[in-house]
Image: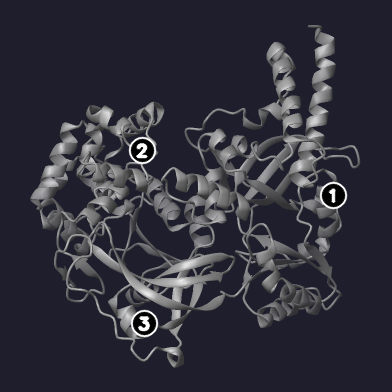
Amino acid sequence: MDRSWAERRIAELTATIRHHEYLYYVRNEPEISDAAFDGLMEELKRLEAAFPDLRRPDSPTQRVGGAAAPDFAKVPHQPPMYSLDNAFSEADLRDFDRRVREGLGGEPVAYVCELKIDGLSISLRYEDGLFVQGATRGDGEIGEDVTENLRTIGSIPLRLDGSEAPVPPRLIVRGEVFMTKQVLEELNAALAAEGKPLLQNPRNAAAGGLRQKDPRKTRERRLDAFLYQVAEADQLGFSDHWSALERLAVWRFKVNPHRRLAGSIDEVIDWIKGWQERRHDLPYEIDGLVIKVNDLSQQRRLGFTSKFPRWAIAYKFPAEERETTVVGISLEVGRTGVVTPAAELAPVRIAGTTVKRATLHNEDYIREKDIRIGDTVIVRKAGEIIPEVVRVVLEKRPPDAQPWSFPAECPACGAELVRPEGEAAVRCTNSLCPAQQYRAILHFASRDAMNIEGLGEALVQSLLEHGLIEDAADLYRLREKRDALLSLERMGEKSVENLLAAIDATRQNPLHRLIFALGIRHVGERAARLLADHFGSMEAIEQAGLDELTAIPGLGPKIAESVRSYFASPRSHQLLAKLRAAGVNMVGEKKTGPAEGPLAGMTVVVTGTLARWGRKEIEALIQELGGKAAGSVSRKTSFVVAGEAAGSKLKKAQELGIPVLTEDEFYVRYVQG
């Protein structure tokens, strides 16, 4: 094959494929069949295989070209990716408009109105038109490098088209990765056929898909992306946000077509009202609308608060409420024996999805709202995700509807149900309850615990039903039962070997993961780390007395009593003995020396909602800086980091005279400096 001809043909194929990718993924106007497109791609692959040095990093064949990532590197955002302040009513929007006009001295202002896509925020960096790096939003200051996963999304160009407008040497674009409703339905249909857990909603499915370690798995999620902002657009010669959006479309980014340039807040409000119901007709989910000052010089003058830009706001749709009927009340037994009631509902459409079930939390919740089988109730989705019963429509109550109360026996095993004094939860007293074992094994295998990939709800249920396991420790003996595994439905040679390899890989997990995986009541990830760091081995924890446990800073008497109770149980001894025999790691690195870092020797309590970090992230950061993240305020607390809606912990800190920092003060004093 002639090299010069191959080079020309590769260039032709690359240009042709890019053109058809743009038509298919961005414009939704394909000109050729899938088979014809696949033929072009296969020809390009063959030519690049014959001449590997002619394969370019922006070749269409490289959309799934990267290796699986063992972990995601951290990426600093320059400029930061700020979150937006929220508006929940027309009054909030008018107040925002008033602040904007006052900040601009009363001069005219125009707003750009855009849909707020319910997905995962991303930042893309292009050098000389070539896509070189993509990252998640993270905390706004630092995100995670997901470049290889973003390459799999067809609507994200690997090289920008500068034929109609020149591309700057360096370009940073922000946007949102999302999953369409149709893709979610199709993926869930396939998962249901395989007996695997379903994806809960498009947002979580998109976020989980983008953070897959293997780009091939990301590609299977069939994600999409809208781009909505040019970072530091004024420095690239743009005068307003609207023209920057139009330029993104010229460079062949996918820009949402549903946007409006409004000359007043009245026009903004009219536009919002129009989307209140129409949003469910969209092929993707939106959770509100975004309003931005259009003029970039005005944006610059308005500036930022410590958390939000003053020139933009996100209007959040109110939770939708619908009327339906309670056809039954069911009970679910959790891994610690807590029995949670749920209302079985006549199907009702809320916020674009069909709702058939709503949590009822506990016995007090049912009694307080007086919820009865047969009642007509008002249901809404809390945070657009979790269905809940708001109230009973008493005037529609059937005359024969009776008050509901908890049964005396566990629905899963028939053991006595008890409600400990001072608690809202009702519990099953049988530690061998099959429902508890099922939930305990699922928890043991979950991502934050032992992280056994591929061990989902249906498979755990099947293993229990066929007698292949009785508890989590039996998972490590499944290799001895390989033939029995192969006889299970949808478990072929490859599936079985993948499962066994995933289980084997967890034998050497860090000690704190195993402690958390045991499912000890009240022991979360933070407490598990404290125990692992303090004792250094499972044996030392087993032998520890209550006084020693209580003395660990940040653990607290409630957790200490729960730990002591767990390790005093003969059943726990049996489980740990089986795990030891299976070769599961029982030791860690005992941290006895003085902590290093700016927080060395300090105990920090975090309370309220933070804009920069999630709770797990800031507690991990405190530990990295040498400090201890505690769950309650005491005289031993060094200081408290308080976010929005801080409650009793903040009040107690103020009563005790303990210093209180905002998250920005904490960042400047201990992280940045």
Which of the 4 image quadrants contains residue 641?
bottom left
Disc 3 to disc 1: CB gap under 8 Å:
no
Q: Amino acid at mark 1?
A: Arg
**Which residue is pictured at 79% across the width and 20% down the height?**
10
Q: CA distance from mark 1 to mark 2?
A: 53 Å
Q: Amino acid at mark 2?
A: Glu
- Observer-side mark, 2 or 3, equals 2
Would residue 51 appear left or right of 109 to someone viewing this image? left
Disc ID at residue 247: 1
Disc ID at residue 371: 3
> Which numbered disc, 2 or 3, marks the residue that appears first in the sequence?
3
Q: Amino acid at mark 3?
A: Ile
Disc ID at residue 489: 2
- Observer-side mark, 3 or 1, equals 3
Disc 1 to disc 2: CB gap under 8 Å:
no
User: Where 378 sits versus 410, above or below?
Assistant: below
In terms of depth relative to the viewer, which is nearer, 374 or 577?
374
Toward the top, the furthest residue is 1
From where the camera sits, is residue 78 visible? Answer: no
